[in-house]
Each structure stands twice: as structure tokens, then as C-alpha cells.
């Protein structure tokens, strides 16, 4: 009798790197599976989005924008990779089983199903991907989901005199095993021959149908199809064994990274060491396991965690695992690390920051929650706290994390001259999936920059200085974020997306991002002088000069050439006979040299 399905192996292995960009993802089960249950909804690959979903009420003749109504799903963030699923069968040794081989037993353990997920286009080079195989997260409730074992087995001929063939298929939804009988009641080619069918346990309740090459449902999700080339003979009979499904008990996730793109398809002689064979699906050697982290408090990327004011009590971190099996306390010892670092890398803003491994105690609360209590007095403002769990932490069944788990959070930052809300309002969908801590770090960097260019110690205009400081910090922080977004490679001058049969393409957002960067740089220059002068000089101020120089073409002055004031009394203008030297205190008393002669002006 079949048992709940397990995963025997996956490719690429969890944590594998350098995978060829034209490769596929495969999963091998320990028994035959219901192929109808393994599709692009239950077996998926996620990775960096290749473009943007655009749609809604957007006018195609308008300039493309970044407004929320222009975007359907996951702009610029990880999304589903379009793929197709195919199947093959292998025996316990890994040898391929031909399609002509049949299984009448109804047990499902005769062979193993191999599911292959093939991307519709090559993967992006040097990117991280995650494969997901959906299982039933709770097998005790009435809601069934995820992949499941094979339930409908091959039609076994009991009486066969003709050349016609009947195939069984589908996913049986009944709760108890049933054997169906199909008998030809009128011979002939497919399309004209007729049949009757009934349950073996209830031969007096009979149903009829006409042979077709398409699917013809019997009941409970079971269908039959007929070979198009054979001829059926009256009295030919088949039986089809159907058994209730067994669901994959949990969803499985594993990650890998693509190579540089120099290799698209691995050569046939390449090693298959990337496939790690498991003794069961719950062994931790590949990290494909039901044992993983489900919740962290503080959450990953959370900003502004309060520092304990109790001199006897430090901060607390809790980590909850998904597995219902108790966590193995022995595997926690020496496998948890916590350290704190300055947010900006160095203590350059006169704040005490902890930069070493932290002291803490770790314990299990209940069976699946890890509690980390930091010793008091270790955290300060401008700290980033990084928690690392070793891959060997396991439950009592031997399931391990399979890969190192890292999460982080931060305390409050200072100086901060603008707000998280302001940044999110300004940049909208561009920073929709950016963590609070990352945005606050950009604000911290910008605030330090603004402090560095505030040259005056006495602020002449505090109101305007504070306004200019906020605006300059906002523009600088947004510039840091937008430059990071623009450099991630997802923004191009041409974008396309496909949703099923719908394909949409349009001009990309690269030019729009460049315009945003230019606008932010202009904003920085606009407010910089006001900050540098303590608000005394504003961007729109009208300056009153101490000295001015009139040009020769000034509209309110006569046109003159070069003018001199005489240095002796002979050529000087004398206002009176008693004056021995001229004092020129107006423009009219200057003299202009023209045509080799002095002329009175």
C-alpha cells in the first residue's frame, strides 16, 4: 500500500550556483504522482522580473508613467518565471521507464515520477531563483491542495479480441478505492463503437457512452480516452483501478543561482553532482524540507526597534519554525549567532555603537519557537542587529534548515531630517517592496551629508533653514534609492510581459528613471545654498549688491569708450579758478579719449 509521497531528489540542488541559464528544474518523487496535480500553479519558479506588467485604464498614446494604475502586478520585483511542465518515469535505480510500460497494481510504488519545469526563455545570468512545489499545508482539514499521488491506473484488458485500446486517466476524488469496468457493447472504429461502464462492486448500475479520442468522464474525476487507430469488438472488457490520493504533506522550497550566461545548456558529459539524492524527503542534506523559519520578531528589515531601558533586561528576538515536529534543542547549541554593527559601517557621527558579537541566552518556548534574549546594555542607536541560524539546526525527526538563515533589524537612526512616509509618498511603487530599514538608511546617509555642508554655527533664519534641510535630505535620500533601483538591470528602454495568452510590450522606464535622477540632482542644487548659509540665502531671494559695474551698453547710460581721470592739473577739469586739482565725483567729470584729443564731457 502506498504511503504519503516524499521527494527523492531535486535539481538544481538547494544552494547551487553557476547553473546554466538554459537549464530546467526537476523533482523526482519516491512513487508515481497524479500528473494533473503537478502544473504551473503547484510547481513554480520565481526570480527577478524581466519587465513590467502594464494595463488597466492606461492610454497607449500617453507618456508611460510609474503610477500605480499603470502597473498590474509586480513591477521591478521578483515574479513568476513563465514555464511548462513535462513528465517522465524512472525505476528505483534511476533508469528511464518507457511510456509503453503499464501499471495495473493500483499501488503506485512500482515506478517514480520525474516532473520537469522548463522556463519558456533562458534565465537571467547571475540571478537568484527559488523553486516551489506546493503541498497540502494542513492534511487534517477538508480543503485539499497541492500535488498528490497517482490515483487512476492503467486500464487492464480482461477480454481483448480487437485492436482497440482504452486508457484511464484523471484524478480520482473518491474517498474509498473503486474498480471500474468498461465493456464494448457495439464494435467498430473509435467514434462509432459504444461501451457500457459500471463499478465492479455494483454491476447492476450501468452507464453507456460512445468511444472518442478525447476525454470522456466516468465519475469522481476519472476519465477514459480511446486509441484513434484501433477497432473495437463487442465484448472486449477492461478494468481500471482507482485509489484515494495521498497529498504531499507540506510545500517545499529551494534556491539556486544562475551562472554568467557563458553556458546555456550543460554538455551531456557534465557531472550530475548537483542532484543530491535523499533517503527521504525530510532529510536535510538538500534543504528541501518541511523544516524552515515561518516567522521572525522583529521582522526581517524592520526599522526602529526600541532599546530596552531596563538595566536588568535586554532585548528579545523570537524565531518560529514551520514544522509541527519539535525542534531538537541539541542542534541549537553553538548554532545561533547575533552581532551588532554600526548602520553606516563606522562610528563617524559621534554615537556609541556596538560592533562585536553580542552576548545572549537561547531557549525553546514550546516545541517550535526559538527565543533569543540579549544581555542588557549592548544595543545603541544606529545599530544593525544580524541574527544567523546555522543550516544544521533541525527538528527531532532529523529535518534541517538545509541552508544558513540570516535575518536583521535596526534600532533608531540619528540624525534623521526627513521621514519614511515622505519618501514612500514621493517614490510610490518604485520602493513598494523596499524594507523600512533600507529607506531609513538612505535617509541617515542623506542627513549626515546635510550636516556636513551646514557651514554656519549661528542660524540666521531657523524656519527656512529647517525647511531647506528637510527638502535637501529628502532629495538626497531619494537620489540614493533611485540610483540603486536604476542600476539593478531590470529597467530597459523596452519592456514586455506575458499573462497567459495576453502579451503586452511598450517602451521601458529607463528614460523616466533618468529624468527622475536629473530632477533630484536639480533639487539638491536648489536647496544646497540655503542649508550652507543657515537659511539666510534662499533659492528665490533677490540680492542687494554692495557694488555694481555698469557696462557700455547699459540702457540708462550714454555710450562711451574708455574713460580716464587726469593725474595732473593741466588736463583736469577745474570747477573753479581757486581749485588746484580736480576731484571727480560724478560720471560727467570723467574724460574720454577720442581721436587723439581731450574732449569735455
Image (cartoon, rainbow, N blue to C red):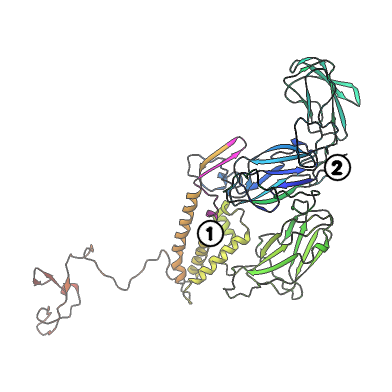
Q: Residues within 10 Å of mark 2 (few under 14, many from 20)?
A: some
Tag 2, which secondary structure? Answer: loop
Name above or below for residue 376 compared with residue 104: below
User: Residue 494 colored magenta?
Assistant: yes
- Work out which quarter of the rendered image holds the C terminus and state it: bottom left
User: Residue 109 colored magenta?
Assistant: no
Closer-to-camera residue (148/157): 157
Closer-to-camera residue (320/68): 320
Residue at left 22%, top 63%?
553
Indicate which label's residue lies in the foreground, 2 or 1.
2
Tell me where residue 34 appears, x and y as whole percent. Answer: 77, 36
Q: Quadrant of residue 266?
A: top right
Tell me where residue 224 appears, x and y as whole percent. Answer: 78, 26
Tell me where residue 203 appears, x and y as whole percent. Answer: 90, 22
68 left or right, relative to 390: left
The residue that disc 1 covers is 478
6 left or right, relative to 431: right
Name above or below for residue 145 compared with residue 181: below
293 left or right, relative to 174: left
How far, Cα to Cα, is label 2 from label 1? 56 Å
Disc sitting over residue 3 in the figure: 2
Q: Earlier in the sequence, mark 2 or mark 1?
A: 2
Q: Which residues are magenta?
A: 480-502
Amino acid at each position: 500500500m502506498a504511503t504519503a509521497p516524499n521527494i527523492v531528489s531535486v535539481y538544481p540542488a538547494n544552494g547551487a550556483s553557476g547553473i546554466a541559464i538554459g537549464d530546467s528544474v526537476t523533482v523526482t518523487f519516491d512513487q508515481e504522482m497524479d500528473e494533473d496535480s503537478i502544473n504551473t500553479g503547484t510547481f513554480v519558479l520565481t526570480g527577478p522580473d524581466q519587465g513590467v506588467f502594464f494595463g488597466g485604464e492606461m492610454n497607449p498614446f500617453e507618456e508611460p508613467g510609474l503610477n500605480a494604475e499603470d502597473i498590474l502586478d509586480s513591477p521591478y520585483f521578483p515574479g513568476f518565471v513563465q514555464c511548462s511542465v513535462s513528465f517522465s518515469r524512472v525505476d528505483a535505480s534511476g533508469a528511464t521507464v518507457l511510456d509503453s510500460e503499464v501499471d495495473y497494481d493500483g499501488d503506485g510504488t512500482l515506478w517514480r515520477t520525474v516532473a520537469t519545469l522548463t522556463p519558456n526563455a533562458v534565465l537571467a545570468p547571475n540571478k537568484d531563483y527559488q523553486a516551489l512545489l506546493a503541498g497540502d499545508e494542513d492534511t487534517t482539514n477538508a480543503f485539499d491542495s497541492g500535488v498528490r499521488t497517482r490515483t487512476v491506473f492503467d486500464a487492464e484488458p480482461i477480454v481483448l479480441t480487437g485492436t482497440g485500446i482504452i486508457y484511464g486517466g484523471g484524478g480520482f476524488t473518491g474517498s474509498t478505492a473503486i474498480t471500474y469496468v468498461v465493456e464494448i457493447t457495439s464494435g467498430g472504429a473509435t467514434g462509432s463503437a459504444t461501451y457500457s461502464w459500471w463499478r465492479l462492486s455494483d454491476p447492476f448500475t450501468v452507464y453507456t457512452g460512445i468511444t472518442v479520442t478525447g476525454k470522456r468522464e466516468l465519475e469522481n474525476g476519472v476519465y477514459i480516452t480511446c486509441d484513434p487507430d484501433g477497432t473495437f469488438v463487442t465484448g472486449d472488457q477492461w478494468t481500471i483501478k482507482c485509489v484515494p490520493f495521498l497529498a504531499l504533506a507540506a510545500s517545499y522550497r529551494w534556491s539556486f543561482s544562475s551562472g554568467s550566461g557563458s553556458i546555456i545548456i550543460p554538455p551531456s558529459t557534465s557531472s550530475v553532482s548537483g542532484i543530491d539524492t535523499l533517503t527521504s524527503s525530510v532529510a536535510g542534506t538538500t534543504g528541501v524540507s518541511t523544516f524552515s523559519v515561518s516567522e521572525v520578531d522583529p521582522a526581517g528589515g524592520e526599522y526602529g526597534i526600541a532599546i530596552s531601558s531596563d538595566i536588568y533586561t535586554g532585548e528579545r528576538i523570537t524565531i518560529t519554525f514551520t514544522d509541527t515536529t519539535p525542534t531538537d534543542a541539541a542542534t541549537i547549541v553553538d548554532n545561533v549567532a547575533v552581532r551588532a554593527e554600526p548602520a553606516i559601517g563606522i562610528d563617524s557621527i559621534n554615537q556609541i555603537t556596538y560592533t562585536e558579537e553580542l552576548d545572549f541566552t537561547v531557549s525553546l518556548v514550546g516545541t517550535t519557537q526559538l527565543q533569543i534574549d540579549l544581555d542588557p546594555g549592548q544595543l545603541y542607536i544606529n545599530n544593525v542587529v544580524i541574527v544567523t541560524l546555522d543550516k544544521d539546526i533541525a527538528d527531532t525527526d532529523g529535518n534541517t534548515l538545509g541552508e544558513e538563515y540570516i535575518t536583521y533589524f535596526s534600532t533608531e537612526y540619528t540624525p534623521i531630517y526627513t521621514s519614511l512616509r515622505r519618501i514612500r509618498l514621493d517614490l510610490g511603487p518604485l520602493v513598494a517592496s523596499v524594507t523600512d530599514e533600507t529607506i531609513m538608511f538612505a535617509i541617515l546617509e542623506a542627513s549626515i551629508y546635510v550636516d556636513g555642508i551646514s557651514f554656519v554655527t549661528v542660524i540666521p533664519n531657523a524656519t527656512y533653514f529647517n525647511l531647506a534641510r528637510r527638502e535637501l535630505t529628502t532629495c538626497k535620500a531619494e537620489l540614493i534609492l533611485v540610483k540603486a533601483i536604476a542600476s539593478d538591470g531590470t529597467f530597459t528602454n523596452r519592456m514586455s510581459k506575458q499573462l497567459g495568452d495576453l502579451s503586452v510590450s511598450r517602451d521601458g522606464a529607463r528614460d523616466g528613471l533618468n529624468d527622475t535622477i536629473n530632477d533630484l540632482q536639480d533639487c539638491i542644487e536648489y536647496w544646497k545654498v540655503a542649508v550652507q548659509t543657515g537659511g539666510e540665502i534662499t533659492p528665490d531671494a533677490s540680492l542687494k549688491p554692495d557694488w555694481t559695474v555698469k557696462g557700455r551698453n547699459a540702457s540708462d547710460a550714454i555710450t562711451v569708450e574708455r574713460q580716464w581721470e587726469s593725474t595732473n592739473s593741466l588736463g583736469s577739469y577745474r570747477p573753479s579758478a581757486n581749485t588746484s586739482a580736480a576731484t571727480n565725483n560724478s560720471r560727467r567729470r570723467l574724460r574720454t579719449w577720442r581721436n587723439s584729443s581731450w574732449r569735455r564731457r
